[in-house]
């Protein structure tokens, strides 16, 4: 497994030539992803004090498939306490630069729940409606990218609310298998544009233009910025970009053997390097039985002890 890990970590994903390094990386990526699909979530005795073995396991999983699922042994019923514990947990994974989200509460934690309040009304994360495939912060300006996030289940919905997860490196792999020119097109600095958005209070989110695939400046690892939405989005006007966007959207809708499905239980969560994900619709409970998912977004990846590219 160590050889496979090193192959994944040290591959230069920006080199699109057909060579042995590409073939070796492709084989290693698929084998490790298939192996991890069969492994149980990482067990953590206490969210605010994870043991070193659990931290190492999460970091390794994130380094080879960009996400890890964990479960805690002591789900605390206090929302504020869990939020604070979640931030301390993130710090153990090297996640310290949290996004200053407008809906964040204690410790930069956003409580995602059904809401009709000002600033949340009409935004899909605060409704029971399904969410299409995306990476978080795809509308952020290039200088403020979301590189990682944690989702933690505080209260589960009555039914539904399942997440599907997909490593962006697998998306890159499938797209490159189909046509390397599609990858080149989505690396263009003007590949995808999200128009500006002005809220009722006058707050303006400016136009955001950038690539779909780009390198993390600290590690060289592949990062992805994407949404499968078809409204309020503009793709670069060239044949390769339009074909790549269509292929990617259709492929995500069709499913892939390396996609992971999970309906988080209370005390369970996802740590990731901003992987592709969606969410099915759900039926909410009343009052204290309403679905609550805690989320923190970060401007950095889960800690990695090397500098390479994958």
Image (cartoon, grey):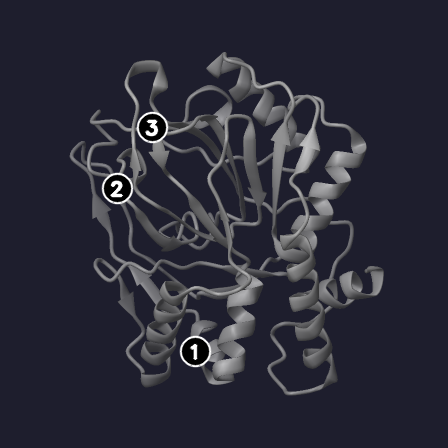
**Circle 1 Cα neighbour tier, 10 Å, few/some/many (<14 / 14–19 / ≥20):** many
Q: Which residue is mark 3?
A: 113
Toward the right, the furthest residue is 2
Q: CA distance from mark 3 to mark 2?
A: 12 Å
Query: Where does the image place residue 273, in percent across and percent down from the top left?
Result: 57, 49
- Whichever of callouts 3 and 2 sits on the residue coming sooner in the sequence is 3
Q: Is residue 139 left or right of residue 19?
A: left
Q: Which one is nearer the viewer's eye here, 295 or 223?
A: 295
Q: Is residue 108 left or right of residue 141?
A: right
206 in relation to 292, above or below: below
Q: Is residue 275 left or right of residue 1?
A: left
- Whichever of callouts 3 and 1 sits on the residue coming sooner in the sequence is 3
Q: CA distance from mark 2 to mark 1?
A: 32 Å
Query: Where does the image place residue 24, in percent across and percent down from the top left?
Result: 73, 77
Toward the bottom, the furthest residue is 18
Name the element at disc 3.
loop
Q: CA distance from mark 3 to mark 1?
A: 37 Å
Is residue 220 something one can see in this rendering? no
Q: Which residue is mark 2?
A: 129
Residue 185 is labelled as 1
**Circle 2 Cα neighbour tier, 10 Å, few/some/many (<14 / 14–19 / ≥20):** some
């Amino acid at each position: 497994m160590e050889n496979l890990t090193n192959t994944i970590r040290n591959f230069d994903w920006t080199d699109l030539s057909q060579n042995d390094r590409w073939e070796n990386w492709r084989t290693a990526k698929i084998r490790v992803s298939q192996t991890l699909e069969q492994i149980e979530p990482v067990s953590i005795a206490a969210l605010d004090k994870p043991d070193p073995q659990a931290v190492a396991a999460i970091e390794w999983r994130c380094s080879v498939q960009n996400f890890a699922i964990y479960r805690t042994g002591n789900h605390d019923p206090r929302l504020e306490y869990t939020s604070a514990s979640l931030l301390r947990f993130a710090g153990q994974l090297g996640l310290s630069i949290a996004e200053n989200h407008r809906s964040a509460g204690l410790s930069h934690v956003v409580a995602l729940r059904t809401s009709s309040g000002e600033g949340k009304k009409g935004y899909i994360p605060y409704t029971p409606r399904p969410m299409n495939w995306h990476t978080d912060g795809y509308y952020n300006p290039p200088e403020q990218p979301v590189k990682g996030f944690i989702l933690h289940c505080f209260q589960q919905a009555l039914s539904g609310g399942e997440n599907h997860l997909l490593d962006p490196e697998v998306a890159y792999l499938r797209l490159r298998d189909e046509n390397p020119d599609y990858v080149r097109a989505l690396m263009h600095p003007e590949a995808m544009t999200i128009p500006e958005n002005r809220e009722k209070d006058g707050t303006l989110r400016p136009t955001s233009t950038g690539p779909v695939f780009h390198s993390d400046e600290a590690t060289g690892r592949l990062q992805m910025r994407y949404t499968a939405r078809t409204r309020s989005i503009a793709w670069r006007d060239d044949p390769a970009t339009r074909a790549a966007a269509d292929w990617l959207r259709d492929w995500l809708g069709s499913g892939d053997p390396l996609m992971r499905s999970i309906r988080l239980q209370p005390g369970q969560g996802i740590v990731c390097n901003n992987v592709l994900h969606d969410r099915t619709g759900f039926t909410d409970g009343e009052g204290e039985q309403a679905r609550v998912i805690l989320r923190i977004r970060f401007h950095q990846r889960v800690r990695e002890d090397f500098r390479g590219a994958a």
